[in-house]
Amino acid sequence: MPNDPKYQTYESPLAARNASKEMLRLFSPQYKFGLWRRLWLELARCERELGLSRISTDALKQMESKLDDIDFDMAAGWEKRLRHDVMAHVHTFEEIAPAAKGIIHLGATSQYVVDNADLIIMRDGMQLLAQRIASAIDALGSFAAKWRDLPTLGYTHFQPAQLTTVGKRATLWAQDLAIDLEELEYRILNLRFRGVKGTTGTQASFLSLFDGDHAKVERLDRMVTERFGFKESFAVTGQTYPRKVDAQVTSSLGGVAASVHKFANDIRILAGMKQLEEPFEEEQVGSSAMAYKRNPMRCERATGLARFVISLTSSPLQTAAEQWFERTLDDSSNKRLAIPEPFLATDGMLQIVVNVARGLVVYPKVIEAAVRAELPFMATEEVIMAGVKAGGDRQNLHERIRRHSLAAAEEVKQHGRSNDLMDRLRGDEAFGAVDLEGALDPSKFVGRAPEQVDRFIQDVVEQIRQRYKGKLDAAVELKV
């Protein structure tokens, strides 16, 4: 429809083009404010269990029955009047659970719901990302196993070096992600709850509610913490949980981004060398002008998202540094961007990695040609040893190979011709007794690369597969 209003408002590409519906749900208003209500309900339940009889059974029942029945228009109306989002949702909840009027948010500060909900969302988001990383490692492990012994040129300084295998190279990508997964699992396991700490973290309001009973206040903190699946809460807080937590979490996501960036860049370079390509759909267009092109668009997209996530890692650290005493509010507007966006972008780029890794296309003949072009130089030591075994003089053979190698290199670099080193050696009587073809067997130059692939899959990939059994993405359909 022309001039459709929905196309006249900015829409974040992170939501429209990248993040999954699962990740978008975690950062949705429905999920967040539903958590607020659950936090209010559990607070009230625990307070009642600890002796606050003013909290009635009817109040708890009404609250429980309306956890997800949120009137967002009503909440917006309240917030417009009050200029306070938490109080707006307190009033909105009271409207639909009137028996709980006056006991919702009892003794709590705004950060009881805001911070604790944020921690739950980050935990849930990290768990989803951990599954995505595990799926990527699973996919790369399968790829590595398939191509474990296909020789390919290794590169150092982007110069041809000793041979490796296509499968071994894939294990390097997977290993980076395995390190990230270990880091993320650590963050999930050790994430603390803010808990029930009161306005400036002193728990003064709860001490008053329980007539100075310190044991009950401590028990309330533990009860609420455990009911939301956390092992422990912070021993002390100001008004908020330490903002260093946000910096630690986003730094972990930045680590994932660095791994994805390297993986995607390597694929892009290999695609330019025509050795390997990401999946390319039947009707996909690589270029509006150059119809023959097969641009690595998915990996380019992943690279861009990774760069964005890496750039965001400094913002939460600055926020942590800027907090004054028990708390200052400049964290709020920043957190609304600096926390969801790296999660959404990391989710999007990991889906791309899984999609690409499960559909990588290898061109063995191109890889073999690249190996053949450089292998004669790499095989010279093998040729010398074979010549010595056949009765030749080591120093004489070395000098002959040196001269032939320089001449062959000149043919390649100065005249653009193919590497003719082996032809030169065949014409040299000093190497007449050497099996030159046998010396050029690429499999002799890959060391233990195939066996390293096997060990990596056994010791790393299989362990991850077992931990995430039933949670691995078999296939990922990317958004446009």
Image (cartoon, helix red, strand yellow):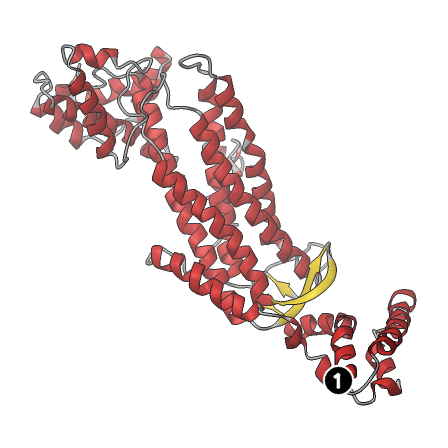
Q: Of residues 384 and 378, which is closer to you in this image?
A: 384
Quadrant assignment, res 438: bottom right
Viewer-side residue, 420 vs 427: 427
* Residue drawn at the location 51% of the way across and 31% of the way down: 9
Foreground of the two, 328 or 38: 328
Is residue 327 visible in the rendered structure shown here? yes
Indicate the quadrant where residue 314 lies.
Answer: top right
Residue at the bottom extreme of this rendering: 433
User: What crowding class fits label 1: few (fewer than 14 Cα within 10 Å), some (14-19), or many (20 or more)?
Assistant: few
Circle 1 — which element? helix
From the top left corner, tell me how far across and down residue 448 is, in percent: 57, 69
Question: Which residue is drawn at the image coordinates 45% and 35% (left, top)?
Answer: 249
Q: Which residue is mark 1?
A: 389
Which is more toward the observer, 325 or 262? Answer: 325
**Above or below: residue 161 compared with residue 50:** below
Number of numbered discs: 1
Looking at the image, residue 478 sits to the left or right of residue 77; the answer is: right
Q: Specify whether residue 274 is in view.
A: no
Q: Is residue 205 left or right of residue 313?
A: left
Question: In the rendered structure, which amino acid carries the disc numbered 1?
Answer: Lys
Percent across and percent down for residue 44 are 17, 23
Give residue 29's quadrant in the image: top left
Give x and y (percent) for residue 325: 43, 12
User: At 76% from the left edge and 70% from the top edge, which residue is drawn?
Assistant: 374
Find residue 417 and report its horizontal and vertical position in percent.
87, 72
Residue displayed at 35% across by 11% down: 81
